[in-house]
Image (cartoon, coloured by chain):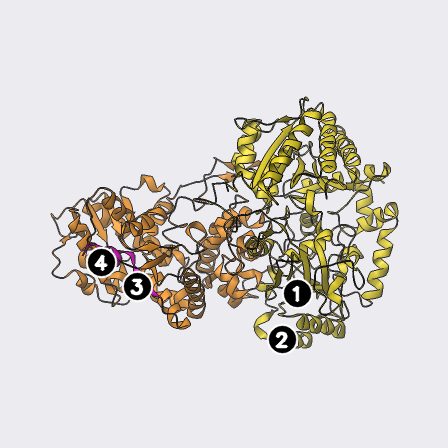
Amino acid sequence: MALEKIEYDASHCQRCSTCKWSHLWEVKSQRFVRNCPSVWYGKFDAYAAQGKNDIVTGLLRGELSWEESKDALLEIIYRCPVCAACDISCKRVMDLDIIGVLDALREEACEKGYGPLPAHKEFIQSIMNYDNVWKQPRTRRSNWAKKLGIKDLSKSGEKADVLYYVGCTYAYKPGMETVPQNTTDILKAAGVDFGILGAKEICCGGIADNVGDKKSFEEIAQKNLTMFAETGAKTIVTNCPGCFMTFSEKYACMQKIDTKDLPYEVKHSTQYIDELIRQGKITFKNPVNMQVTWHDPCHLGRRGEPYKHWEGKRVQFGLTDPPREMNRGVNGIYDAPRNVLQAIPGLKLVEMERIKEYSWCCGSGGGAKSAYPDFAIATAKERVEEAEATGAGTIATACPWCEANLNDGIDATGSSMQVEDILDLVKKAMG
Amino acid sequence: MAFTEVAYKALQDIVGEENVSNEPAICQAYSRVQWLPSGVMQRENCGLNMRPACVVMPGSTEEVQNIVKIANRYQFPFIPRGSGFTFQAFPTAAGTIVIDPKRMDRIIELNEKDMYAVIEPYVSFVGLQSEAMKYGLYTPTPLAGSQVSCLANYAWHGAYGNSWITGVGAQNLLGFELVLPDGEVVKSGSMTCPGAGNFWNDGPGPDLRGFLRGGMFGHAGGIGVVTKISCKLWQFAGPEVFPTEGNANMKFSSGFGEDVWRWYMIKFPYKYPEEEELELKKSAELFYEMGKAEIGEVATHLAQQFLYTYSSVTKQDLFDNIKNDVFPSGFVVVALQAKTSFKQMEYEEKVLKEIVKKVGGIFVEEDEPAYQVWIKRAANEWIRFGNAQRLARPSDNFSIGSSNVDSIDSIVYEIIESNEVGRDLLKKEGLGKDFVQPLSIHGGWISPQEYGYWCLHTTDVFPEQEPEQCNQAIEIIGKVAKSQLERKSAAAVIHLLGPAYDIFGPMLGNVHLIMKDLKKEFDPNNLANPGYATRPDVLSQEELQKMMGH
């Protein structure tokens, strides 16, 4: 059933292969000419958006069945970070909802009972059991915040202008607690009235939606929406791009509304801090003498665009009724992190060849890291090599999944590069 | 003989298990040519299963040779592919395998001094151009888009945005290495002589470029697998990196700099479409004068259909521009490049202005919508992006309605006549009445080649991707082509299936028989893309002849 929603888009693929290459205007070398980790790694066309369109068309028209090729289908569908590089390249020439095709294939796999994969089920079960993806007790969720004196908005009577949502990975992953701690220091230094949900914070549920488990996702999302409403906070700030996209895009999509009509505004911490810097509420004391290159997390960049709800149909010539404004990757969060980095004294920002909406994915998203770790690490290695080519010694990013996977890529290549969270750099500069 | 498990294992031994697959899901991704009316017809009307028996990815010429030898030993058909954006390279017979060249993606040599590159099949135009630009050189960009295989497009004899200087694919081939259908390797041009360099196509050694002849009465992979080519690179005044700014998807301006590159749009003071004939004749005059003066990097005439599609940001934007009459007629587009010096470009600009004045043309002003939409948004597309598949944006499907190769004068005559036939078909028989209009009746991309020495044109029609409209599109192609041949015109029927060869061949010096003889000689087992040129089992000759009114 899920596939029927995107039949037009899949069956009108022109097979031009634009989906396989980095944005043609932006290609600077043969070395970094590709955009799609999935087909770059898997090579066969089936791993590209073009091939997935063929597969959808084949499934819908009875030329291909799940039964004859289930294992291969699952690998084709899930060995992909759903980074949307294909979608953005395609939309330069056509008006097809390619990311919708990839999502629908995952939803279809789940409807058939074949998906998600065991590694994904572990995550989802963990959320159901513990409210986090890491099988950790709820009580440890706010350990990072001990003695920091942050308001707990889950407690009755506590109110704040801003809800700071930390996310599972920053809350639990050893070594990553510095990011929420530094965020706290930065917000406090800027005089922001904020609070957290403490041990009551639960996973955003993005992973469930990413792998096609809509039912679990909706259950988790409803809990979060209720909790957000109870806090009364109008602004949610989050560090994790996955949470950012889930709250701004997926929750809007689930409720069939535009992002702008959500009862809250979601800001990624880089956006919020960029504003604070421009307002003069954050100042820097220490130079950070580093050459840094910025890795755009997909969920912050091309997948971080505000959601614009559309319900309608394709009419004559493939036009949409009512007219549909498609996301084309141009309104992602690209400038804010770069502004923040460039505001840090002593820091020199150098760009990789593939950036912004045509950035190369780290390889971790869409459940790829858990189900296909070799693929994820190979994809990260490719990014590390691209970063090394800039001459920078540090990759800055703002995503715990990118950070972890890029570090795995560094280990695999033996590179001397470092990965730093952008907020750790901000804190260093603030002193 | 069918493709067997034994043959599959033999392929695994050649390329490694990970580089060959017979999984239905993997093979399904090589089973469609849906975007052409003929592809839609095959699928919708004939129910043809085009899924290959397996897909194999060789990593070297030797591996290709071995694959081909195995095909001969076990008697299964094979189809070589480039990037996969294809008219003809799809299975039409059970048991066919596809040879996907993704592992052969090396730029083997980029020779700055002699201005050529030696490349493997999966090097795209964009990849090669980006490397060439570092040396003050560039490649042409095909209208199919710079994402396509450079080797496959040259072998197919594609045409380019700057064909004014580069000509078509054949003129850019300096040599090739070809694995014949029996597995033997042949080389062409100076590639035949070890140590001679790869810079010259006319010898020493035989010039075998006619072998390839992909798109127009060629074999479309039916005479072996090209594993390497040497191709020309052209002077480029810079910059070294294609300049863009901001978010690429919505910003079209690429800002080459007025010191190295200048675009012009030229129109004529005639009523359109009523006086289209005068406009096209004046355009031809302009091209001839430019050719005589040997100026310009790009010189082409774009009909409305090309202007609207190429410059569109979205499908809605395309239809809005049509509604707002942004391009009230076709236009001539010219670019000048400071290849040798700024003075040279300034000189060419002066000459161009004199010529435009002489032929009664008018430069489109910067504040005109046409200039804003074309020059500001899309002009540099010709240099880097090509079109990819934006040409299909009006209906998510398209078809060439007519196509010719001839002198500029003859091309203009043909466009006028072909358009008249097309309009008649619409008026009298209702053919194309549901297509995107007016784009489907006022056609004409006039692409003078090599300073106007010769010329090609295409006009496109935009049926939707459904059988009735696709049938109509094929009927229009056939009837327009028939009218062209009755006028003794050099029609280039590149979108029709196998039967076209037998129907149009006798009217074109029996070229089809020559190609069939070549095929028979070099592919005695008829294993290399057997279904395309020689065995029309998809759309029957009877059906096609009926459509054409025979």
Dot placed on the residue nearer the N-terminal end, 1 or 2: 2
* Residue contact between numbered discs 3 and 2, judged by CB atoms under 8 Å: no
Q: Which mark is nearer the camera, 4 or 1?
A: 4
Residue named by callout 3: A133
- B467 sits left or right of A190 in the view: right
Residue named by callout 1: B99
Q: Is residue B394 visible?
A: no
Q: Which mark is nearer the camera, 3 or 2?
A: 2
B340 relative to A205, above or below: above
- Secondary structure state at the residue bearing disc 1: strand
Question: What span is in magenta?
Answer: A415-431
Front in this rendered view, residue B355 or A177: B355
Report the Cα–Cα distance between label 4 and label 2: 55 Å
* Residue contact between numbered discs 4 and 2, judged by CB atoms under 8 Å: no
- Secondary structure state at the residue bearing disc 4: helix
- Could you say which chain is coloured orange in the image? A
Q: Which mark is nearer the camera, 4 or 3?
A: 4
Residue B207 location, x and y as percent? 79, 59
The chain letter for the residue carrying disc 1 is B
Report the Cα–Cα distance between label 1 and label 2: 13 Å
- On whether residue A104 falls in the magenta region, the answer is no
Residue A428: numbered disc: 4
